[in-house]
Amino acid sequence: MYRTDSRKAEEFICHEEILDTLDYAQAHCNDLAMVRSILEKAKACKGLTHREAAILLECRDAQMTEEIYQLARDIKQRLYGNRIVMFAPLYLSNYCVNSCTYCPYHIKNKHIARKKLTQEEIIKEVTALQDMGHKRLAIESGEDPLHNPIDYILESIRTIYSIKHKNGAIRRVNVNIAATTVENYRKLHEAGIGTYILFQETYHKENYEKLHPRGPKSDYAYHTEAMDRAMEGGIDDVGIGVLFGLNTYRYDFVGLLMHAEHLEATFGVGPHTISVPRICPADDIDTNDFENAVSDEVFQRIVAVIRLSVPYTGMIISTRESQRSREKVLELGISQISGGSRTSVGGYAESDLLEENSAQFDISDHRTLDEVVAWLLRLGYIPSFCTACYREGRTGDRFMSLVKTGQIANCCTPNALMTLQEYLEDYASPETRVLGDEMILRQMEEIPNPAIRRRALENLARIKKEGKRDFRF
Ligand code: SF4
Ligand code: SF4
């Protein structure tokens, strides 16, 4: 039985409802009047139901497809402007007791180098990340109660927040660790984490069980209900996602939106972010083994329709994607990207050799953070190192209500420009500095509220002339 506010995984991600939705989408995707009326609804930024979204995903009419893309661009511009939030993953440990068939950290992989960072090594990693200019991290760890217990994760978070190297600081630590108990989520909340991120991988229960044959992650319901427990534990901001390519994209796309609807119906606030990783090669993982691999064209459509369906939810893309692919989806809806990433344990402070030996996945975008920042500036985006909302207590429904009334726009642009100025002063190459200064000059004119513009100008001057840091609205 399908019930969006049920607390049971198989009721809020109801297999029959997904199959019915896919049939419904097949039956109506060529009904252009219906497609047009869905686009009208999306235009008002009120979001779409999973059924409406499935129709847009399925529609192959050329004119309508262009309208879907154009509306996604418009909504992206209207709600997020040209700001792109920057972050980096930090791998703490690749010990893992699970057996995910698509991940080289699976327990049976004997030729990958296993490593868990000590607190001293974390200091080195975070110092290297701060020296690149990062302010926002997503920590990642395999599941292993012996090597990576919750106390290790909590201690690592404390270490990360405590490091102040030169003008650097990590101001927001998002956490991507295995599904856990309400009690452990409460501890993470008390440790001051930003978003708790957990990918569902696939919502298809039968395939999920095949892809996760052993280990705690094999329990589909426990994994799928993790965000409910996280919210019960006090975590306001949760990030969901699937690994596109593990299962048919249509099924997982509908499951993803049903999960968002469930969180909204149950807790009054949907997911803070949605990540859209695609299966990619890695040590002992061959993408040819995955018949559902998603093409660039389908991937772009997925991003565009998610943008229309949950307009206020941030969308994240990693360095799994190439520069070309990232460029395309940035305009269609992506609001956060990683830059200069290493997907191995100890990869920021250590050599490239380690990256080859212990990476979770192969990176397609190998550019440094400075190169990514310069690239974004050339494309007309403002790379933002802002972490203000979480630090001002604007999380969960408080955050969403500010976003939905448009008030957040008064904060985002000045915060983006001030944090970009910090980056330019402390870390940028001369070329990036020129591009960034030009961008800041242009964008200051665009801040509509004169009082905020004046204060932002004062703060920019203090960042440059007095060496002050960490201003925020
Ligand atoms: Fe372990 Fe996560 Fe990799 Fe699965 S995806 S093997 S849980 S690190
Ligand atoms: Fe994100 Fe808030 Fe900063 Fe805007 S002000 S970029 S919503 S953290």
Image (spheres, helix red, strand yellow):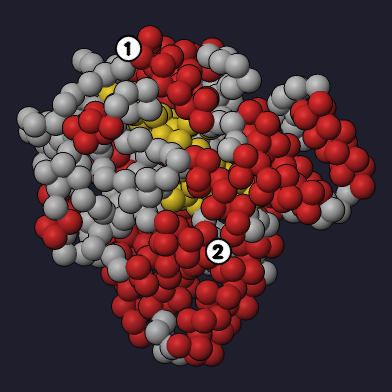
Characterize the local packing of mark 2: few (<14), some (14-19) or many (20 or more) Cα atoms within 10 angstroms: many
Q: Earlier in the sequence, mark 1 or mark 2?
A: 1
Q: Quadrant of residue 221?
A: top left
Q: Where residue 318 sits: x, y (%)?
A: 41, 47
| Residue to which mark 2 is pinned | 331
Amino acid identity at mark 2: Glu
| Residue furthest out toward the front | 430
Beta carbon at label 2 within 8 Å of ligand 2: no
Q: Is residue 167 above or below residue 207?
A: above
Query: Which of these two is toward me, 464 or 66?
Result: 464
Q: Residue at x 43, y 14 (%)?
A: 123
Q: Where residue 198 sits: x, y (%)?
A: 37, 39
User: Label 2 near label 1: C-beta < 8 Å?
Assistant: no
- Helix, strand or loop at label 1? It is loop
Which quadrant of the rendered structure holds the C terminus?
Answer: top right
Q: Residue at x 16, y 26 (%)?
A: 113
Characterize the local packing of mark 1: few (<14), some (14-19) or many (20 or more) Cα atoms within 10 angstroms: some
Q: Is residue 277 above or below residue 163?
A: below
Q: Residue at x 41, y 82 (%)?
A: 59
Q: Is residue 319 left or right of residue 464?
A: left
Find the distance from the CA under tag 1 to the CA under tag 2. Answer: 40 Å
- Helix, strand or loop at label 2? It is helix
| Residue to which mark 1 is pinned | 118
Q: Is residue 465 above or below residue 337?
A: above
Query: Which of these two is toward me, 126 or 429?
Result: 429
Amino acid identity at mark 1: Thr
Q: Is residue 94 visible?
A: yes
Query: Which of these two is toward me, 154 or 256?
Result: 154
